[in-house]
Image (tube, rainbow, N blue to C red):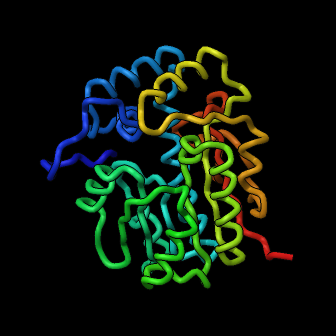
């Protein structure tokens, strides 16, 4: 269930399309504007199950979190957290690990403002930062005592690297592989072009071209490459609705979004 936003300081920037707000529309949220709804409607015409896919993406994330906890991970960073969407990551992980630390991170300052309004408590932190600067972010979090990089850390990157250019996206996962300790986890989902019709690809790209975060779509091989150094778990890289041990309400629908969880291996 989406958390509704009360009157909050500042106003949504509604004069231009916004990626997080389009995602919010697809999730059934309220933190969006008319032009974002129109963009989501256009997407729905060429990909009728896009909203279902995005909701399945959030379900994937919430199943990945206790999967992290089962692997001994008790500190998590959600990259590109978006507008608050209950149940929240810290609520989910603390069912298995009550003392877990969670950092929510987003480049959009309005998103971060909303997150600070709704996501708070001991061990919960919200920061506004660019995922491209993940190395500096990790150093800052470690220096400030927010996270201990000697401990296993879980990275949630659900539908995030889709908005990052190729070279930078690869560098992000390489930095994670260098800076995190063995046993750390990466839960990643990404739009996959391998089975998408050209009309759907065109509509997706056009919907986000007018936003500050245009899409960078990739095929299955390119998505798998993000897990270099991470061993994919037994569920593999599959449509997000089909990932995990228990069937869910969202049936796989052709793999628009692929998801997987990998654990960092010991360095040679």
Q: Which of the 4 image quarters holds residue 256?
A: top right
The residue furthest right is 268
Pick the quarter of the image with the C terminus: bottom right
Q: Residue 147 at what x, y percent from top left?
A: 49, 79
Q: Nearer the viewer, residue 145 or 43?
A: 145
Pick the quarter of the image with the N terminus: top left
210 w.r.t. 108: above or below: above
Q: Residue at x 75, y 63 (%)?
A: 230
256 w.r.t. 64: above or below: above
Q: Residue at x 46, y 25 (%)?
A: 207
Q: Is residue 71 visible?
A: yes
Q: Residue at x 51, y 74 (%)?
A: 75
**Along the horizontal axis of the image, is 106 left or right of 153?**
left
Q: Residue 55 at what x, y percent from top left?
A: 47, 39
Q: Residue 142 at what x, y percent from top left?
A: 50, 81
Q: Nearer the viewer, residue 132 or 224?
A: 132
**Along the horizontal axis of the image, is 108 left or right of 166?**
left
**Along the horizontal axis of the image, is 196 left or right of 248?**
right
Q: Residue 94 at what x, y percent from top left?
A: 43, 72
Q: Is residue 247 visible?
A: no
209 w.r.t. 118: above or below: above
Q: Residue at x 70, y 62 (%)?
A: 174
Q: Nearer the viewer, residue 167 or 24?
A: 167
Please tell me how many numbered marks the rendered image carries.
Answer: 0
């Amino acid at each position: 269930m989406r958390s509704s936003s009360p009157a909050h300081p500042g106003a949504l920037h509604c004069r231009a399309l916004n990626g997080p707000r389009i995602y919010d529309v697809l999730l059934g949220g309220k933190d969006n504007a008319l032009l974002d709804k129109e963009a989501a409607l256009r997407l729905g015409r060429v990909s009728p199950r896009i909203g279902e896919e995005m909701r399945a993406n959030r379900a994937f994330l919430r199943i990945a979190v206790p999967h992290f906890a089962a692997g001994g991970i008790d500190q998590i960073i959600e990259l590109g957290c978006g507008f608050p969407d209950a149940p929240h990551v810290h609520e989910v992980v603390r069912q298995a690990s009550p003392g877990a630390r969670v950092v929510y991170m987003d480049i959009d300052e309005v998103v971060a403002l909303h997150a600070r309004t709704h996501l708070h408590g001991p061990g919960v932190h919200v920061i506004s930062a660019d995922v491209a600067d993940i190395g500096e972010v990790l150093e800052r979090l470690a220096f400030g005592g927010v996270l201990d990089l000697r401990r296993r850390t879980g990275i949630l990157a659900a539908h995030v690297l889709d908005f990052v250019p190729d070279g930078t996206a690869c560098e992000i996962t390489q930095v994670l592989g260098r800076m995190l300790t063995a046993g750390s986890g990466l839960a990643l989902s990404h739009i996959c072009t391998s089975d998408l019709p050209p009309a759907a690809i065109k509509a997706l790209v056009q919907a986000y071209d007018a936003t500050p975060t245009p899409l960078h779509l990739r095929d299955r091989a390119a998505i798998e490459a993000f897990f270099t150094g991470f061993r994919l778990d037994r569920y593999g890289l599959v449509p997000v609705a089909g990932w995990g041990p228990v069937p869910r309400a969202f049936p796989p629908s052709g793999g628009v979004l692929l998801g997987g969880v990998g654990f960092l291996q010991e360095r040679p």
